[in-house]
Image (cartoon, rainbow, N blue to C red):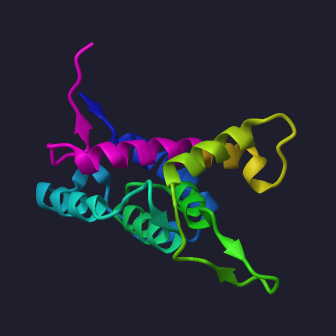
Amino acid sequence: MINVSGIFAGFSASTAIQHSNIQSEKRPDPIELKEDDLRSLKEEIAGYDLENISQQELVALGGTLFHEGLINDTVYAVMGLGNAEYDERGNQINEHKKFNALEYFDKQLSLSSEPGAGGELGSASGKDGYKQLNQVLSVLKFFATSNTPDLALKTKA
């Protein structure tokens, strides 16, 4: 059995705490989530279409996953940035504009992996954030459409 909650969790809790004050909040261990909690989470996740999602919806989804202890602060931050657009004064605009998050973040991972990629999201932590987020989104898509109410997959080699 492969426990995909580890993909959600990403870095260890101690590493995540070093990167964010948000982490000081007590969050549940994903393994401790009860079947009813997972079923409820699955229903909530199923309400999002990752191929047609707004920035505002992506932030809400990220908040839910973060507060349930399923993603770390790095993945949450990358989700929060999403395809955000800003006006000349630095105010976010078009928060309701829909985009394909799976395609967008896959492209961002490719761009951040190119030689000479600069800026925060071109850094090693940015690449890791995109890589982890792509894994999370893939698992979420499967989890939301699967017949099983848990975050573990039974596989045969």
Q: Which residues are magenta?
A: 131-157
Quarter occupied by residue 64: bottom left
144 falls in the magenta region: yes
At horizontal 30% and vertical 42% (from top left) the residue drawn is: 142
At horizontal 62% and vertical 65% (from top left) the residue drawn is: 81
Residue 11 visible to an observer of this rendering: no
Residue 94 visible to an observer of this rendering: yes
**Where does the image place residue 6, in percent across and percent down from the top left?**
38, 41
At horizontal 61% and vertical 59% (from top left) the residue drawn is: 18
Q: Residue 87 or 135: which is nearer the viewer?
A: 87
Q: Quarter holding the N terminus? A: top left
Quarter occupied by residue 49: bottom left
State whether residue 139 is above or below residue 74. Answer: above
Q: How many marks?
A: 0
**Where does the image place residue 47, in percent across and percent down from the top left?**
29, 64
Q: In this image, 90 relative to 7: left or right?
A: right
Q: Residue 111 or 23: which is nearer the viewer?
A: 111
Q: Residue 121 or 102: which is nearer the viewer?
A: 102
Q: Residue 154 or 146: which is nearer the viewer?
A: 146
**Where does the image place residue 157, in percent across and percent down from the top left?**
27, 12
136 falls in the magenta region: yes
